[in-house]
Amino acid sequence: MKKEKERIIGFCCNECAYAAADLAGQSGMKYPINTRIIRTPCSGSTDPLWVLEGLAQGAKGVFVSGCLPDQCHYGDGNVHAEESVNFLKKLLKAIGINPKYITSYFNSAGMPEAFSNSTTDFVKDVLSLPKLPDIKDKVKSEDKRERFLEILLAYATALGTIEKVNEKPIPREGFGMITVDEDKCVSCGSCALLCETDAITAKETKKHRKMYYAHHLCTGCEACVRACPTEAITVKKEIHLKPFLAKENNQFAGNQFVACSKCGAIYATVDILEEIKDEFELIDSKIVSLCPVCRREQVGVDYVNLSKYLISANLATEEEVK
Ligand code: SF4
Ligand code: SF4
């Protein structure tokens, strides 16, 4: 009876794995009664959070099953499902959990025996593993990403592995780690403006702009790379568990503001002016010390003066007219 209560959740694709499970039942083939199958349109639609959530909500193990390789009805959903489970296995291992609590396998609709055997083997393996800590109460957020983090953090904390978390980066779409070349960054703030998740933020005082980065919020979308005028940022699509779990928000650049020499308004950082100095020197080096508003005024004044000069220079004298 006790073993019966230890549930195993299986996310099975509608096209093959679920059909195989159905056929196994109709054909009198057995698989453990602990198994609870959740039908999904495609195994690739199984969100990694659902697998973690299954464990967090008390399932002893979770499996994902899709069509055979090259036979996914939606392209390559089955491959994505396998990649997701492999990614989760690495995460579990990194926080000190045996990755055997989860698995993935392929089936065709006409392979009920294979489904029955794979499921029976998995359930047998999982039931021999120790019980994972009960972390249900620690998982509260309704935000998907935050919830994902909460589950990993709760397990690492409960198992006492938080300080020993493996720091090796784990590649994965949907996560990003930026590197900023400090020599190139001018603290312009453009990356923070374009970053939709607030992974990059700018904090400003009257004198400074400081740039911060929080890896746990970064989706690796590369908007910051496109925004950066100095090509200072690169992004790798991977997760670094230590800063991710610690929700680190570290300063990566900072620079002093410069005030307009005419009106006193703050308009740029020291490094921005340094960066564009050469271009302005071609026109007029004085103009670089002006804010955009005063610069426009100055250009207008210069233009009017220049026009006057040109007109007067071109006016013919009375004698020339004769
Ligand atoms: S990659 Fe995307 S989410 Fe990450 S810091 Fe850059 S803009 Fe923000
Ligand atoms: S990384 Fe690029 S876009 Fe971001 S503050 Fe530095 S220079 Fe500006």
Image (cartoon, rainbow, N blue to C red):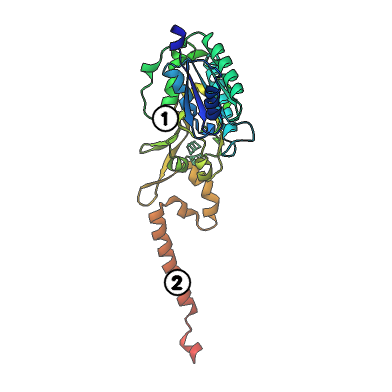
Q: Looking at the image, can residue 141 be seen?
A: yes
Looking at the image, which is closer to me, 126 or 167? 126
Residue farthest along the bottom direction in this orientation: 322
Q: Position of residue 2 (x, y in %)?
A: 44, 7
Q: Is residue 246 visible?
A: no
Residue underneath mark 1:
144
Q: Residue at x 38, y 17 (%)?
A: 136
The residue that appears at 46% across and 15% down in the rendered structure is: 7
Q: Residue furthest right?
A: 70
Residue type highlighted by circle 1:
Lys
Of all residues shown, which one is farthest toward the front?
A: 27
Instruction: Indicate the amino acid at tag 2.
Output: Ser
Where is residue 93? Give x, y as percent.
55, 17
Q: Residue at x 59, y 39 (%)?
A: 75
Q: Nearer the viewer, residue 240 or 111?
A: 111
* Residue for point 47% across, 52% down: 288
Q: CA distance from mark 2 to mark 1?
A: 62 Å
- Ligand 1 within 8 Å of disc 1? The answer is no
Q: Assign a secondary structure to mark 2.
A: helix
Label 1 Cα neighbours within 10 Å, binned few <14 / some 14-19 / many ≥20: few
Q: Which residue is mark 2?
A: 307
Q: Who is closer to the viewer here, 242 or 73?
A: 73
Local packing at callout 2 (Cα closer than 10 Å; few below 14, some 14-19, many 20+) is: few
Whether tag 2 and tag 1 are in contact, CB under 8 A, the answer is: no
Give the quadrant of residue 179: top right
Across the whole image, how many numbered discs are drawn on residues? 2
Compare residues 93 and 211 and report the one nearer the observer: 93
Residue 168 at x, y = what percent? 58, 22
